[in-house]
């Protein structure tokens, strides 16, 4: 089962000279009257000076992360522009990101974070249906670099939102993403919401939530010295539960050292509901390789887990395409990395008609009130990622 390949470490930070000035500490940026659907994030210099986020830990359960299928206010994405990372594949992956944004925008608002020097070109490509916001973006992985948006728990007399940050270090130092490492803070300031931080290093693709108190994660991408040296699984679990407003954890083993993410959960197992978990299944389970073994072990652990009511989960397999168009090393030929938005499930198609149709039918059964929209994402998949990796939902506040 291929995953995102290792890429060379490149200095992807942005010089402070390239960034728009911030006129006051913590000041929110805004879209000017003549700028249409464009704006910019207030940006600290490259050392982070001049930015004072609220990193005081919140009271446990004061905020929580809703399930992805809860109603969204909008989707956030990041525009890829780094030729050192993508090389000749940059144009194709840009077209994939544009297509994903357009598909989501048919159902809910989309805001794209874009480097300042790319704004004009991206505006011409995306048109007015996608809002653009200047930001020191290094790459497209919004799931990993943007905050987890949290809302106040049901019954709170003052509905509110917070940004939950896990500190991004380039998937355990495998790449340098100085700009991306600041995005959670910048977005919290732009939206004028508190930033919650429990000191964990990791990525948003490393956890799944059901919105009802359970978190799902792979040990390989958290209990790992390249992210959280010296921390035990219990310590990391306590931090994740507190950050996400949850009270119970399901761990799978994952697999470290075979892809850049060290085995993100959003390609292995995902909640479809509070009682249903979808797991990845290889197209050729008889093959002898680490990815087949990983899928079998993940399914075994999920089948052994129980819901908050003590009942077994319904475990649904979604089988990979047997004959995808993409054949490069690291091509993520998996349907697991779908994205649930208002009224739709945005999912990949790989040119294997039978497998594509089976995935579409399964997702339609899992999310019966949503339209399943399949997109060719071969450029993105060649980089080891998928639609979920490139998106981050902002939930709608209760009562709005």
Image (cartoon, rainbow, N blue to C red):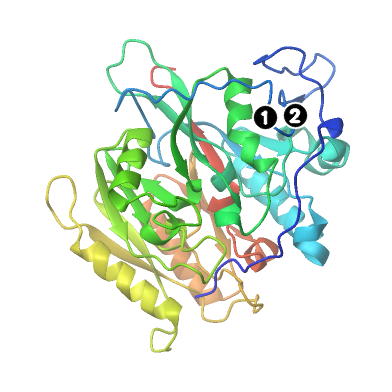
Residue lying at the far front of the rendered structure: 230
Q: Residue at x 30, y 15 (%)?
A: 156
Q: Is residue 182 visible?
A: yes
Where does the image place residue 75, in percent across and percent down from the top left? 57, 37
Q: In the rendered structure, are the residues bearing label 1 and label 2 in contact, judged by CB atoms less than 8 Å apart? A: yes
Q: Residue at x 71, y 23 (%)?
A: 42
- SS at mark 2 in the image: loop
From what the image shows, is residue 98 above or below residue 60?
below
Q: Pointer 2: residues within 10 angstroms few (<14), some, or many (20+)?
A: some
Report, in whole angstroms, how far the alpha carbon at label 1 lies from the one at label 2. Answer: 5 Å
Where does the image place residue 51, in percent across and percent down from the top left? 64, 22
Where does the image place residue 353, in percent across and percent down from the top left? 55, 74
Q: Residue at x 66, y 68 (%)?
A: 382
Q: Quadrant of residue 118?
A: top right
Q: Quadrant of the C terminus?
A: top left
- SS at mark 1 in the image: loop
From what the image shows, is residue 179 above or below residue 51?
below
Give the tally of numbered discs: 2
**Which residue in the protein does label 2 denote?**
45
Locate residue 232 relative to residue 41 in the image: left or right. Answer: left
From what the image shows, is residue 137 above or below residue 219?
above
From what the image shows, is residue 46 above or below residue 267?
above
Q: Is residue 271 visible?
A: no
Where does the image place residue 174, in percent across and percent down from the top left? 62, 59
**Which residue in the protein does label 1 denote?**
48
Residue 388 is marked as none
């Amino acid at each position: 089962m291929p995953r995102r390949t290792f890429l060379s470490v490149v200095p992807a930070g942005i010089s402070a000279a390239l960034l728009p000035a911030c006129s006051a500490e913590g000041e929110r940026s805004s879209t000017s009257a003549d700028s249409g659907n464009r704006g910019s994030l207030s940006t600290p210099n490259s050392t982070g000076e001049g930015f004072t986020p609220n990193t005081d830990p919140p009271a446990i359960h004061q905020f929580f992360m809703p399930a992805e299928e809860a109603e969204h206010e909008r989707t956030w994405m990041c525009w890829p522009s780094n030729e050192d990372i993508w090389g000749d594949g940059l144009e194709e992956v840009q077209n994939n990101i544009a297509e994903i944004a357009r598909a989501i925008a048919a159902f809910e608002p989309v805001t794209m974070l874009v480097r300042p020097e790319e704004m004009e070109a991206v505006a011409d490509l995306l048109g007015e249906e996608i809002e653009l916001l200047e930001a020191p973006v290094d790459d497209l992985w919004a799931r990993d670099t943007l905050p987890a948006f949290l809302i106040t728990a049901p019954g709170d007399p003052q509905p509110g939102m917070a940004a939950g940050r896990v500190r991004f270090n380039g998937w355990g130092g495998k790449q340098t993403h100085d700009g991306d490492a600041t995005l959670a803070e910048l977005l919290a300031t732009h939206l004028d919401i508190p930033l919650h931080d429990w000191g964990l290093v990791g990525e948003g693709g490393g956890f799944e939530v059901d919105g009802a108190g359970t978190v799902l994660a792979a040990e390989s991408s958290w209990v790992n010295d390249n992210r959280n040296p010296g921390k035990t699984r219990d310590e990391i679990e306590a931090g994740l539960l507190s950050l996400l407003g949850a009270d119970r954890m399901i761990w799978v083993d994952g697999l470290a050292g075979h892809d850049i993410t060290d085995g993100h959960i959003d390609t292995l197992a995902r909640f479809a509901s509070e009682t249903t978990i979808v797991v990845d299944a290889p197209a050729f389970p008889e093959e002898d390789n680490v990815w087949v073994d990983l899928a079998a072990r993940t399914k075994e652990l999920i089948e052994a887990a129980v819901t908050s009511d003590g009942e077994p989960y319904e475990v649904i397999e979604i089988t990979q395409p047997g004959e995808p168009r993409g054949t490069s090393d690291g091509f993520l030929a998996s349907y697991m990395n779908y994205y649930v938005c208002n009224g739709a499930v945005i999912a990949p198609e790989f040119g294997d008609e039978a497998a594509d149709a089976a995935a579409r039918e399964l997702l339609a059964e899992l999310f019966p009130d949503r339209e399943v929209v399949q997109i060719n994402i071969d450029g993105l998949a060649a980089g080891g990622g998928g639609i979920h990796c490139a998106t981050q939902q902002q939930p709608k506040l209760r009562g709005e």
